[in-house]
Image (cartoon, grey):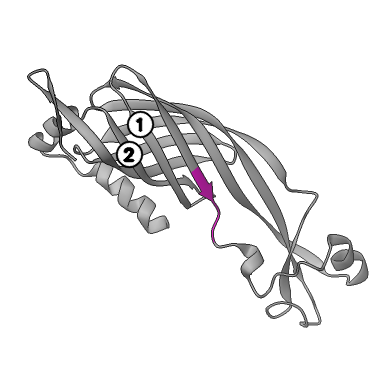
Amino acid sequence: MKRVVLLAATLILVPASPAAAQDARRLADGLAVGYSANAPNQYFGFSAFTVRKGAVGFYADMKLTLPNLEARDDFYSNISIRTAEQYFGDRHIDSRSSWTSFNGGITYRLASAVALYVGMGLTAESRYRKYDDPTGILGREGQYWIEDKAGGGLRPNVFGGVFLPIDPAWMVQLGAEMGPQGFTVGFARTLFAYWVAGGEAIRIL
């Protein structure tokens, strides 16, 4: 997932040719879907949105944390924090959160090559704690994970950013999110798009 985010950043840094830049400025209304990540917490996600010149469009995305700690062989769903600390006497050595977000909002194109998006969402946080078993019985070489049920819960999310077209079919997403805090990076492909030439809408994709 991190490689995909780096690829999206590279596309921004590589200078576009004059022809490509001209094409990007000509991108008109369209429906797009793409990959969207909230670094450094959620590297798996997808988005769907519309961009309409001079009008409001919709935006929606879903993001989550991978890999899932509960799928590991050193995770125990039947051990509580009280059991690990008071009964086993094991030492807490690490904590980690897993996030699943559902977001919705609006888009608005300020110019042919710049579109803004903003919205709100809801994020479910699952909290986990890692312990060290000095006897080496549990987990991997005595280290194992359990869920901190009291530490998780639902969190609000507020987000916003921009879409920057690369060409008529592709655009890059850059933004920020509050729950969990991070930077949004992604890319999307327009499924249906139109250019306007001589007052006539011409479908290009």
Name the foreground residue: 82 vs 204. 204
Q: What is the spatial separation of the Cα atoms under label 1 and label 2, in whole angstroms?
A: 6 Å
Q: Secondary structure at mark 2?
A: strand
* Position of 118 relative to 170 (above/below): above
Q: Which picture quadrant has residue 50?
A: top left
Q: Which residue is rendered at x = 59% and y = 38% of the image? A: 179
Q: Which residue is rendered at x = 72% and y = 71% of the image? A: 144
Image quadrant containing the C terminus: top left
The stretch drawn in magenta includes residue 176: no
Q: Magenta stretch? A: 62-66
Q: Secondary structure at mark 1?
A: strand
* Image-based side of 116 in relation to 114, left or right: right
Q: Which residue is mark 2?
A: 32
Magenta-highlighted stretch: main secondary structure? strand
Crowd around label 1: few <14 · some 14–19 · many ≥20 (10 Å): many
The answer to whether mark 1 and mark 2 are in CB contact below 8 A is: yes
Instruction: Choose the circle earlier in sequence order: 1 or 2.
Output: 2
Q: Which mark is residue 164?
A: none
Mark 1 residue type: Thr
Q: Which residue is rendered at x = 42% and y = 57% of the image? A: 1
Name the foreground residue: 6 vs 158. 158
Q: Which residue is mark 1?
A: 50
